[in-house]
Protein backbone atom coordinates (compact mmCIF):
# COMPACT_ATOMS: atom_id res chain seq x y z
CA UNK A 1 0.00 0.00 0.00
CA UNK A 2 1.11 3.57 -0.83
CA UNK A 3 1.83 5.77 2.16
CA UNK A 4 -0.63 8.66 2.64
CA UNK A 5 2.19 11.21 2.76
CA UNK A 6 3.26 10.20 -0.74
CA UNK A 7 -0.29 10.69 -2.06
CA UNK A 8 -0.43 14.18 -0.49
CA UNK A 9 2.96 15.01 -1.92
CA UNK A 10 1.95 13.83 -5.38
CA UNK A 11 -1.41 15.77 -5.26
CA UNK A 12 0.32 18.95 -4.04
CA UNK A 13 2.95 18.68 -6.76
CA UNK A 14 0.27 18.16 -9.42
CA UNK A 15 -1.62 21.20 -8.13
CA UNK A 16 1.49 23.40 -8.27
CA UNK A 17 2.38 22.16 -11.78
CA UNK A 18 -1.22 22.84 -12.93
CA UNK A 19 -1.14 26.38 -11.55
CA UNK A 20 2.22 27.10 -13.18
CA UNK A 21 1.00 25.73 -16.53
CA UNK A 22 -2.20 27.81 -16.32
CA UNK A 23 -0.24 30.95 -15.45
CA UNK A 24 2.23 30.38 -18.32
CA UNK A 25 -0.57 29.78 -20.80
CA UNK A 26 -2.39 32.92 -19.62
CA UNK A 27 0.74 35.04 -20.01
CA UNK A 28 1.43 33.61 -23.44
CA UNK A 29 -2.07 34.47 -24.63
CA UNK A 30 -1.80 38.06 -23.31
CA UNK A 31 1.50 38.81 -25.04
CA UNK A 32 3.89 37.43 -22.50
CA UNK A 33 4.25 40.48 -20.26
CA UNK A 34 1.07 40.40 -18.25
CA UNK A 35 -0.45 43.53 -19.82
CA UNK A 36 -2.85 43.92 -22.75
CA UNK A 37 -1.31 44.10 -26.21
CA UNK A 38 -0.22 47.59 -27.26
CA UNK A 39 -2.20 47.24 -30.48
CA UNK A 40 -5.49 46.75 -28.63
CA UNK A 41 -7.80 49.74 -29.09
CA UNK A 42 -8.52 51.86 -26.02
CA UNK A 43 -11.95 51.47 -24.48
CA UNK A 44 -14.52 53.80 -26.04
CA UNK A 45 -15.06 57.13 -24.33
CA UNK A 46 -18.56 57.72 -23.10
CA UNK A 47 -20.08 61.12 -23.65
CA UNK A 48 -23.50 62.38 -22.81
CA UNK A 49 -25.56 62.74 -25.95
CA UNK A 50 -27.83 65.67 -26.63
CA UNK A 51 -30.87 65.74 -28.88
CA UNK A 52 -33.48 68.30 -29.86
CA UNK A 53 -36.80 66.49 -30.21
CA UNK A 54 -40.24 67.61 -31.31
CA UNK A 55 -43.27 65.84 -29.86
CA UNK A 56 -46.23 65.04 -32.12
CA UNK A 57 -48.16 67.91 -30.48
CA UNK A 58 -45.46 70.34 -31.72
CA UNK A 59 -43.69 71.01 -28.41
CA UNK A 60 -39.91 70.94 -28.39
CA UNK A 61 -37.66 69.55 -25.71
CA UNK A 62 -33.98 68.83 -25.24
CA UNK A 63 -32.75 65.42 -24.19
CA UNK A 64 -29.39 65.32 -22.38
CA UNK A 65 -28.37 61.74 -21.77
CA UNK A 66 -31.60 60.18 -20.55
CA UNK A 67 -33.05 63.37 -19.02
CA UNK A 68 -35.61 65.53 -20.86
CA UNK A 69 -35.95 69.30 -20.47
CA UNK A 70 -38.40 71.80 -21.91
CA UNK A 71 -36.66 74.93 -20.56
CA UNK A 72 -33.03 75.80 -19.90
CA UNK A 73 -34.01 76.89 -16.41
CA UNK A 74 -35.00 73.27 -15.61
CA UNK A 75 -31.42 72.05 -15.99
CA UNK A 76 -29.79 72.00 -12.56
CA UNK A 77 -26.79 69.90 -13.59
CA UNK A 78 -24.02 72.34 -14.54
CA UNK A 79 -22.38 69.90 -17.00
CA UNK A 80 -25.68 69.26 -18.77
CA UNK A 81 -26.42 72.98 -18.98
CA UNK A 82 -22.97 73.69 -20.44
CA UNK A 83 -23.50 70.89 -22.98
CA UNK A 84 -26.84 72.38 -24.07
CA UNK A 85 -25.32 75.85 -24.39
CA UNK A 86 -22.41 74.42 -26.40
CA UNK A 87 -24.85 72.66 -28.71
CA UNK A 88 -26.86 75.86 -29.16
CA UNK A 89 -23.67 77.73 -30.05
CA UNK A 90 -22.87 75.04 -32.61
CA UNK A 91 -26.34 75.34 -34.15
CA UNK A 92 -25.97 79.11 -34.21
CA UNK A 93 -22.63 78.72 -35.97
CA UNK A 94 -24.24 76.43 -38.53
CA UNK A 95 -26.86 79.05 -39.36
CA UNK A 96 -24.49 82.02 -39.73
CA UNK A 97 -24.64 83.34 -43.25
CA UNK A 98 -27.92 81.53 -43.92
CA UNK A 99 -31.14 83.25 -44.85
CA UNK A 100 -32.99 84.48 -41.75
CA UNK A 101 -35.74 82.27 -40.45
CA UNK A 102 -39.26 83.53 -41.13
CA UNK A 103 -40.93 85.02 -38.06
CA UNK A 104 -43.24 84.23 -36.41
CA UNK A 105 -42.60 80.51 -36.41
CA UNK A 106 -45.72 78.44 -37.16
CA UNK A 107 -47.27 77.04 -34.02
CA UNK A 108 -45.87 79.77 -31.76
CA UNK A 109 -48.29 82.51 -30.89
CA UNK A 110 -46.95 86.01 -31.57
CA UNK A 111 -48.54 87.09 -28.26
CA UNK A 112 -45.97 85.02 -26.33
CA UNK A 113 -43.15 87.37 -25.25
CA UNK A 114 -39.72 86.57 -26.65
CA UNK A 115 -36.83 85.74 -24.37
CA UNK A 116 -35.47 89.26 -24.88
CA UNK A 117 -38.84 90.77 -23.92
CA UNK A 118 -39.07 88.60 -20.81
CA UNK A 119 -35.54 89.48 -19.69
CA UNK A 120 -36.02 93.16 -20.50
CA UNK A 121 -39.23 93.32 -18.45
CA UNK A 122 -37.38 91.97 -15.40
CA UNK A 123 -34.46 94.36 -16.05
CA UNK A 124 -36.72 97.41 -16.36
CA UNK A 125 -38.53 96.44 -13.15
CA UNK A 126 -35.20 96.16 -11.30
CA UNK A 127 -34.14 99.55 -12.63
CA UNK A 128 -37.49 101.11 -11.65
CA UNK A 129 -37.36 99.73 -8.09
CA UNK A 130 -33.72 100.74 -7.64
CA UNK A 131 -33.35 104.38 -8.73
CA UNK A 132 -29.86 104.47 -7.19
CA UNK A 133 -28.60 102.31 -10.06
CA UNK A 134 -26.98 104.54 -12.70
CA UNK A 135 -28.07 102.40 -15.65
CA UNK A 136 -31.05 103.77 -17.54
CA UNK A 137 -30.38 103.10 -21.23
CA UNK A 138 -29.98 99.32 -20.90
CA UNK A 139 -32.19 96.86 -22.76
CA UNK A 140 -32.31 93.22 -23.74
CA UNK A 141 -33.40 92.87 -27.36
CA UNK A 142 -33.65 90.39 -30.19
CA UNK A 143 -30.94 91.13 -32.74
CA UNK A 144 -31.71 91.10 -36.49
CA UNK A 145 -30.19 87.62 -36.78
CA UNK A 146 -32.57 86.33 -34.07
CA UNK A 147 -30.00 86.12 -31.28
CA UNK A 148 -30.26 87.74 -27.88
CA UNK A 149 -28.49 91.08 -27.56
CA UNK A 150 -27.93 93.78 -24.96
CA UNK A 151 -27.96 97.48 -25.78
CA UNK A 152 -26.20 99.84 -23.38
CA UNK A 153 -26.45 103.52 -24.26
CA UNK A 154 -26.69 102.76 -27.99
CA UNK A 155 -23.81 100.24 -27.96
CA UNK A 156 -24.84 96.66 -28.82
CA UNK A 157 -23.33 93.59 -27.20
CA UNK A 158 -23.99 89.96 -28.09
CA UNK A 159 -22.53 88.51 -24.87
CA UNK A 160 -22.47 89.54 -21.22
CA UNK A 161 -18.69 89.13 -21.12
CA UNK A 162 -18.33 91.96 -23.68
CA UNK A 163 -19.87 94.56 -21.36
CA UNK A 164 -16.98 96.50 -19.79
CA UNK A 165 -18.73 97.56 -16.54
CA UNK A 166 -18.57 94.68 -14.00
CA UNK A 167 -21.43 96.16 -11.93
CA UNK A 168 -23.70 96.22 -14.98
CA UNK A 169 -22.68 92.65 -15.84
CA UNK A 170 -23.63 91.62 -12.28
CA UNK A 171 -27.01 93.35 -12.62
CA UNK A 172 -27.70 91.57 -15.92
CA UNK A 173 -26.64 88.23 -14.40
CA UNK A 174 -29.16 88.88 -11.61
CA UNK A 175 -31.86 89.45 -14.25
CA UNK A 176 -30.96 86.15 -15.93
CA UNK A 177 -30.94 84.35 -12.55
CA UNK A 178 -34.40 85.70 -11.72
CA UNK A 179 -35.69 84.71 -15.15
CA UNK A 180 -34.25 81.19 -14.82
CA UNK A 181 -36.02 80.84 -11.45
CA UNK A 182 -39.29 81.74 -13.14
CA UNK A 183 -39.61 85.36 -11.99
CA UNK A 184 -42.37 87.25 -13.71
CA UNK A 185 -42.22 91.06 -13.88
CA UNK A 186 -44.94 92.93 -12.06
CA UNK A 187 -47.11 94.55 -14.73
Image (cartoon, rainbow, N blue to C red):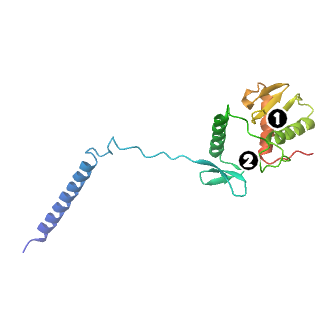
In-front residue for pair 66/169: 66
* Badge 1 density bin: few <14, some 14–19, many ≥20, Cα 10 Å: many
Which residue appears at 28% of the width and 48% of the height? 30
> In the picture provided, is 13 more to the left or to the right than 32?
left
* Residue linked to disc 2: 73
- Image coords of residue 89 (percent x, y): 66, 37
Q: Which label was assigned to residue 105? A: none
Whether residues under marks 2 and 1 lie with C-beta atoms below 8 angstroms apart, the answer is no
Please say if 98 is above or below 182.
Answer: above
Label 1: element kind: strand
Q: Quadrant of the C terminus?
A: top right
* Badge 2 density bin: few <14, some 14–19, many ≥20, Cα 10 Å: some
Q: Please identify the residue farthest to the left as the structure is shown.
A: 1
> In the picture provided, is 170 more to the left or to the right than 36?
right
* Residue linked to disc 1: 140
- Image coords of residue 87 (percent x, y): 63, 41
Q: Quadrant of the N terminus?
A: bottom left
Please say if 160 is above or below 14.
Answer: above
Amino acid sequence: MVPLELIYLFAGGALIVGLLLGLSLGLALRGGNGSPKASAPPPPKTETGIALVRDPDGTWWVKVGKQRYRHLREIHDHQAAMLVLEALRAVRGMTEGSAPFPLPTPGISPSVPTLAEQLDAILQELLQHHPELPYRAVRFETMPDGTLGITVGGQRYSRLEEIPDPNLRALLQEVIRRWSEGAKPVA
